[in-house]
Amino acid sequence: MSVPVLEMKGISKSFYGTQVLKNINLTVGKGEVHCLVGENGAGKSTLMNILFGMSVIVQTGGFEGSVLINGREVAFDSPRAAIDAGIGMVHQEFMLLPGFSVTENVKLNREITKPNLFSAVFGNKMETLNRKKMAQDTRTALDKLGMTIDEWVPVAGLPVGYLQFVEIAREIDKENLQLLVLDEPTAVLTESEAEQFLGVIQRLAQSGICILFITHRLDEVMAVADRITILKDGELVRSGPKEDFTISQIAELMVGRKIDTESRKKRTTRPNDEGAVVLQVRDLRVNMPGEALRGIDLDVFRGEILGIGGLAGHGKVGLANGIMGLYPSQGKVLYEGQEVPLNDTRAALKLGLAFVSEDRRGVGLVLEDSIANNIVLTSMQSQEKFLKPGLLKLKDEKKIMSHALESIDKFDIRCTGPEQIVRRLSGGNQQKVCLARAFTQEPKLLFVSEPTRGIDVGAKSRVLELIVELNEMGVTVVITSSELAELRSIADRIAIIYEGRLAGILPPDAPDVQYGLLMAGKSLEEVGSR
Amino acid sequence: MNQVKRLISRNAVPLLFGIVCLLGVYFAKMPGQFLLMEIVKRMARNSFLVLSLIIPVAAGMGLNFGIVLGALAGQIALILSTHWEWAGIGGLLLTALLATPLAVLFGFLAGMLLNKAKGREMITGMVMGFFANGLYQFVFLFLVGTVIPFDNPRLRISTSPGLRNTIDLSRIKGTLDGIWEVRYGFTKFPMVTFLVIAVLALAIWAFFRTKLGQEFRAVGQDRHIAGVSGINVDRNRILAIVISTVLAAWGQLIFLQNIGTLNTYNSHEQVGTFAIAALLIGGATVTKATIGQALMGTFLFHLLFAVSPNAGQTIFGSAQVGEYFRVFVAYGIIAISLALHAWQSKSLARASLEEDLSS
């Protein structure tokens, strides 16, 4: 048996006490296409960061386990070392310089040079670029990929699909390339581009390069994979040859989780006047970098909790951010039959919409200010509450204090007092401050994004309980979360977003397979809704 | 039609100032011969300094307000060379040689500082210039003659500490310009100075065709991507500033050998702002500057400088107003160009957004 090109043995990693990878084993043989699938937060990126010796890993205390290349143990302390060892990576976000031509990008920092008078004196950095040779090499790489574009065309302005191929051209131009890591490369490609792309992958594999392919599109996995490894919550769920799996099995293994039926029972009242549409979203497009929405139609019923789910990068958090005017958007949004002006946060707030942002520390809170001020800030600004009457609009400190104390009590915020600086609070308590502020606005419709991200388990269930309590007081809630289990525990309906569009809406007790398939880009009909 | 529109909007700044210059020339009613002489003199003086700004722009560090440090290095070398009575073109070359290690040191320190202030290089560089000016004044206004024993009547007044306000540079005055001058009417073309400028322009052009130049450009476009592909970003940025500072030191020497006197405490003060204004008038931006833009900008800026006192005299009845006007113009240009640049990149972003959304 030949020695595998890559072997990762017993990899474990924790960030600040949270274990994100538990004893992962991964083996990739020569000429093999190995698909790595898993939900967001399953640990795929962390695993790749370890393989690449990224500084985030090194700076947070390294990892446990060992990495072997061709049977020899390696310890990469920088991406450079990994590249030198013959590992190439096509990142999810493009690593191309827009102002450079295709050739210049392909040959970036690997330029072919020729000596001149000055380089003899000042060293080889002063050697002149051999643009002709560079272009020849690039042409060869492009030809291998079946690309006809000119090698001197600037990268800026090329269609997105082409950029992906330029990235791969750069990697295969490296002579010592043994292992190519592709991180969700087809996410931005059109169908025909993706097809061409998969062809290229197979051709590369035949030429002896092994490929580690990270994707969410399960039909692609079935089309090209030799072996499949499924990660979930930092653990390896199953690994084996493609023949051992079916699409729906993979989907189920990817998202399957025990649903916490306990918390569902806590909801005493159900939405009474179901059917009354409170929010209508029509063809909403939101340009949120990395989470773009490309035209979505959605109705929110009065009194319900609507869950928004989907994998990262597909646009689920774009919805709330777009409607609340935090990112540029187009389309039509009707709230109680009244048009919500887009790109105007103030107007949205005035209409009675409230938003608890997923970016708690960036958008959600004024970190250096007190709990009290954070709680009243939005109401004070958009609804002119907590102000003394008069022209100067002075803050009514007394009112603010008493309201803050009340909120601290109601939301169970663990702090030294309303004057405490928000930065010093734990994540869970910060989130409670955000909720308290949203509640202070007395909203009729509340958007909550990733409410439990980065907070501990105890606080998690309390935050979810609070959301349910708010809902029971008559607030319609649209909750966005990467944790499907969480949505399924409190939501009445769950909309799954895929590639910026609505893939389908499922009841919380729908089987795992259906969720998995919707998240992987299958339509509701294919999923076979009951 | 669209192409014409794009051409105009891309060159809005040089066009605008071209028009202002033409108006200035019209109102100044200066004889052509005199105007030509002024322009040739000023181009020879200033082009080298303006060209020294190009490399940091390409390396993504914006407009290097820190060239003041280079000018200081040049002046320190010049003070020493005056003290040691170096003369002639040999003296000037020796001075340039002396200025180089100083400029390398200053550039290195500046580069280290700017690496701590990524994304805010321009304002940092500007304040750094003020700070360096303070140190320079402290040394030459106070320490020299008190702590540092220095007794040269050509440079000092014995009754008070510090150097003289103005230092006579007659030993090296015109040594570079005077090697070979071609006369045309009243105007003397300093051929060797222009040759030096041409060589520098050529060197910059060639530099961007080397490995190092390519690295600078990569760092300038995206530090993160350059870093991921193994380019040492911080080192390259320091190097870019060192090169710029050394060039500025030499540029200041060329400037001063033309003027012939050193205003010990003022000559360097506006080097940064004036060179940057000139570069911006040429149509350069914070992210892109070419040799052509540098030379064009130097021409327009100094044409405006040359005509504004007389234009002020005709229009406002006072040359003083013209004087004031040209300083106002220098700072105004920087403000307008930066605002135009911000506005252009914003409208570009908006255009690409609309494209994104409708796709």
Image (spheres, rainbow, N blue to C red):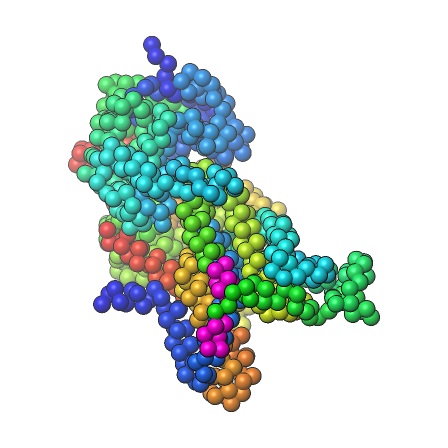
Query: What residue appears at the point 42 percent right and 59 percent down from the top-left corner?
Result: B291
Residue in front for this viewpoint, A395 or A241: A241
> From the image, which quarter does the N terminus of chain B lie in?
bottom left
Q: Residue at x 44, y 71 (%)?
A: B300
Is B340 or A212 nearer to us in this picture?
Answer: B340
Residue furthest out toward the top? A1
| Residue for point 42% across, 20% down | A69
In percent of width and height, residue B195 lies at 48, 60
> Can residue A437 be seen at all in this image of the molecule?
no
Magenta stretch in the rendered image? B183-197
Q: Residue at x 25, y 64 (%)?
A: B3
A450 inside magenta stretch: no
Q: Position of residue B256 (x, y in %)?
A: 60, 66
Q: Is residue B15 left or right of residue B90?
A: left
Determine if the magenta segment contains residue B195.
yes
Name the residue nearer the viewer: B204 or B265: B204
Relative to A317, does residue B317 appear above or below in the rendering? Answer: below
Which residue is farthest bottom? B317
